Amino acid sequence: MIDQYTPTMKLAALKTSKHSHQLSILEAGIHYAIPGITSLTDLHELTLAEIQKLLKERGEIITGTPVAPISPEIELWGAGVTYLRSRDARKEESGVPDVYQKVYEADRPELFYKSNAIRTNTSNQPIGIRFDCPASVPEPEVAIFINKYQEIIGYSICNDVTARTIEGENPLYLSQAKIYVGSTSLGPDITPSWLVPSAAEMKIEAKITRAGELVWQAQTSLGALNRTLADLVSYLFRCQYFPYGAILSTGTGIVPPMDIALEADDTVEIVVEGVGTLRNSVAIIPESPRGYLV
């Protein structure tokens, strides 16, 4: 049964009267300020041991509007073809399937820039499908929060929405398939790394509903990942500089079959055991989306 195990303490980001992405401790529906910490950026500058000690304290109660748990200084990256199902789906979609077979078997993982704060929505906000792509799909993933010391400090959920038709035309179109307005949802909050279940127990379930009817549903677990998280973190930081750490969406083990594609007004729900539920409606992104969905 998914989502039976729920840690009592989470970290959440709020838009308040003073800050656009204020980090808080969330317990029993109440948000508490973190002494000495304003944003996720501040937290990522601390060691894991320092964070564990700090989060034992509570500041004043604060209120605001929930936003995606990513601050303006932090980048969200993605990993691709990290599950067997992802490899098979990419090979089925693509005219050059060998590319995906090779990266699945290679020592070096596929890593790509995915999003930032201004392009990232959170639960109960829309995700988008490009107007110029006939078939787009959700990609349910576990996202890890990495401090500047390359330690995993937290877990969340990412919907790495992908313009499937565009990527299938040519792997070099990856950035257009992955990086556009509405292509990323993250959250709804962060579970500290010492409170999550094991990878094998971290079940991931996703479903698409349309007009109240179930269109597609599938399940996997983080334990099915073809690479270790430590390996992904090591490659992400190789020849890279993240002064405030980074967020890495670790790839999907759940991909809808070729006859399933997102439509406007669909709802996508992703549930990760011990982490939470990310739920988004779907909208079509027009050619000129300035101010749209953000």
Image (spheres, helix red, strand yellow):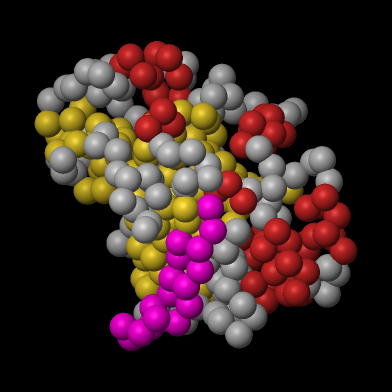
Residue 81, image x, y percentages = 70, 55
Picture quarter with the N terminus: bottom left
Measuring 87% from the left and 64% from the top, which residue is drawn there?
A: 98
Of residues 264 and 30, the one nearer the viewer is 30
Residue 161 located left or right of residue 233? left
Residue 201: x and y, percent? 47, 46
Is residue 168 or residue 196 the one in the foreground? 196
Kindly give the residue lying farthest to the left in the view shown.
61
Is residue 216 depicted above or below 23 in this figure?
Answer: below
Residue 78 at x, y = what percent? 61, 48
**Residue 117 visible somewhere in the drawing:** no
- Tell me how many marks there are: 0
Is residue 212 in the magenta section? yes
In which quadrant of the rendered view does residue 233 lie?
Answer: top right
In the rendered image of this protein, does residue 93 appear above or below residue 101? below
Q: In which quarter of the image is the C terminus?
A: bottom left
Q: Can residue 51 be seen in this view?
A: yes
Q: In this view, does 217 lie above or below 251?
A: below
Q: Does the magenta stretch include residue 213?
A: yes
Say above or below: 244 vs 203: above
Tell me if 153 is positioned left or right of 63 in this view.
right
x%, y% of residue 4?
31, 51
Look at 18% across and 30% down and name the residue there. 32
The magenta segment is: 205-221
Answer with the quarter of the image where residue 291 lies.
bottom left
The residue lying at 35 percent from left, 62 percent from top is 279
Q: Which residue is drawn at 61% across and 77% down?
A: 257
Drawn side of residue 42 relative to residue 150, left or right: left
Main secondary structure along the magenta-highlighted residues: strand
